[in-house]
Image (tube, rainbow, N blue to C red):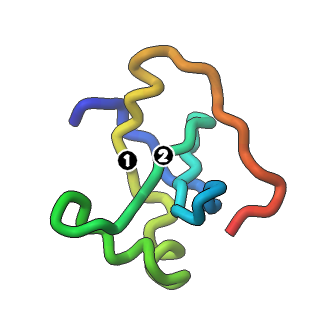
């Protein structure tokens, strides 16, 4: 793992319509499903994203000490 494990607390879409996971640390991380490079079919449906809440992703922004990311008012 190249980052610190942080739980997913929510999701929103970016300005291009890609899904972004909101992490407990305040950072955001794109969670694209683009096989064969990134295989995340769970992100394509509401049920899959809901099931992913609470699971951990590696946050490289925590390693670098980055400040929290901005989040939109209307989460998806």
Which residue appears at 54% of the width and 19% of the height?
Answer: 66
- Where is residue 37? Give x, y as percent: 19, 58
Residue closest to the far front: 16
| Image height of 69 relative to 16, above or below | above
- Where is residue 17? Give x, y as percent: 59, 65
- Where is residue 43? Give x, y as percent: 43, 72
Which residue appears at 62% of the width and 36% of the height?
Answer: 26
Q: Which residue is mark 1?
A: 57
Is 31 situated left or right of 28 in this image? left
- Graded by Cα atoms within 10 Å as few (under 14), some (14 to 19) or many (20 or more), the crowding at tag 2 reads some
First of labels 1, 2 by sequence position: 2
Q: Secondary structure at mark 1?
A: strand
Q: Quadrant of the N terminus?
A: top left
Q: Quadrant of the C terminus?
A: bottom right
Which residue appears at 80% of the width and 62% of the height?
Answer: 74
Is 18 situated left or right of 68 in this image? left
- Graded by Cα atoms within 10 Å as few (under 14), some (14 to 19) or many (20 or more), the crowding at tag 1 reads some
Q: Nearer the viewer, residue 37 or 43?
A: 37
Q: Nearer the viewer, residue 12 or 14?
A: 14
Q: Secondary structure at mark 2?
A: strand
Residue closest to the far top: 65
For residue 36, which numbered disc appears in the image?
none
Q: Which residue is mark 2?
A: 29
């Amino acid at each position: 793992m190249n980052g610190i494990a942080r739980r997913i607390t929510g999701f929103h879409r970016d300005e291009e319509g890609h899904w972004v996971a909101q992490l407990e640390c305040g950072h955001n991380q794109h969670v694209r499903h683009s096989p064969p490079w990134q295989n995340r079919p769970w992100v394509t449906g509401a049920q899959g994203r809901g099931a992913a809440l609470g699971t951990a992703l590696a946050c490289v922004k925590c390693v670098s000490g980055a400040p929290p990311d901005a989040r939109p008012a209307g989460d998806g």
